[in-house]
Image (spheres, rainbow, N blue to C red):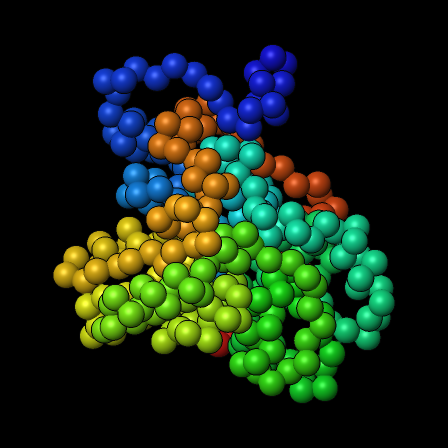
Amino acid sequence: MEILEELNRKGYVEEKIDPTLDLFAEIEKLKKEKNAIILAHYYQEPDIQDIADYIGDSLGLSQEAAKTEADVIVFAGVHFMAETAKILSPEKKVLLPDLKAGCSLADSCPPHLFKKFKEKYPDHLVITYVNCTAELKALSDIVCTSTNAVQIVESLPKDQKIIFGPDKNLGAWVAKKTGRDLVLWNGACMVHEIFSREKITKLKERHPNAKFIAHPECEESVLQMADYIGSTTGLLKYSINNDAKEFIVATESGIIHQMQKACPDKTFIPAPPTNACACNDCPYMKRNTLEKLYLCIKNGMPEVTVPANIIHEARKPIERMLEISAQLGL
């Protein structure tokens, strides 16, 4: 009981770890013992990315969670991602190293308010970005990610009216790309909203040959400057396939680890935010550490659970996204 109270208060298991312990070797051993798989988002710290069985963006992680044979899914990401894994694999145990690894975008769309918003547009289909709570997914018709949002909207009849939430910047970009009139919920991600157009302009002047690449969750004023706009995986592929030697990257800085691993001869510069920091880190993503990951697998907690009725309702729009993505070869 005490352990659970502590867990709810702190969000993670706290235990002394022998400083001489090789955490990489211990985690590998525990994974075999428990038939566990580690799924990690590109925004995790480099050590976690290096120990993960699969690294990806929201679409890839959803696809992996749906097909894994493992008994235990350890999700090195944020809470909504672990919830998505539980919805897709309800019979599996889903662990999250730190329960307080939340999401500012998910927080910007409380389900009870969205439900009232949705009621104002009864003839609209609801598409929600995967970066939202399980309850919000349960109110949706289709879930999307930044990889497939444009294609999902384009797969629907032209006269179909659509509500898009919770990210207004992604929604505005999708509307522009598809020429569709979307009703947008006014939500945003604090990491992608904080990039400074002025500082990026100065950075581009100092690096005239650099390609500026940006995630569609960024504000329109930043996206207007971009040489390429795409999902995290899209940005990674572009940096690998493009001949440029320098890239200014406007998304969470965790992706740069994979970019540098794939292209050691290229230079990747994190786009500067409006605050005093040199780069843009998501404080929620970075709550997960290698130590918390080790203790999480070792103790089998914190565990992420989702009520059965929410699983039933939220599964349908996620499966619809996976079906459309499979049909489109995404």
250 on left or right of 219: left
Q: Is residue 69 visible?
A: no
In percent of width and height, residue 110 lies at: 72, 50
Quarter of the image for the N terminus: give it: top right
Quarter of the image for the C terminus: give it: bottom left
Q: How many marks?
A: 0
Q: Residue furthest left?
A: 265
Q: Residue at x 53, y 77 (%)?
A: 151
294 on left or right of 80: left
Q: Vertical placement of 324 versus 87: above or below?
A: below
Q: Residue at x 53, y 48 (%)?
A: 81
Q: Is residue 144 visible?
A: yes
Q: Vertical placement of 181 versus 266: above or below?
A: below
Residue closer to the observer: 54 or 187:
187
Locate residue 10: give its quadrant.
top right
Residue closer to the observer: 227 or 51:
227
In percent of width and height, residue 240 lies at: 25, 67
In percent of width and height, residue 178 lies at: 57, 82
Q: Residue at x 57, y 75 (%)?
A: 174
Residue closer to the observer: 25 or 79:
79
121 on left or right of 285: right
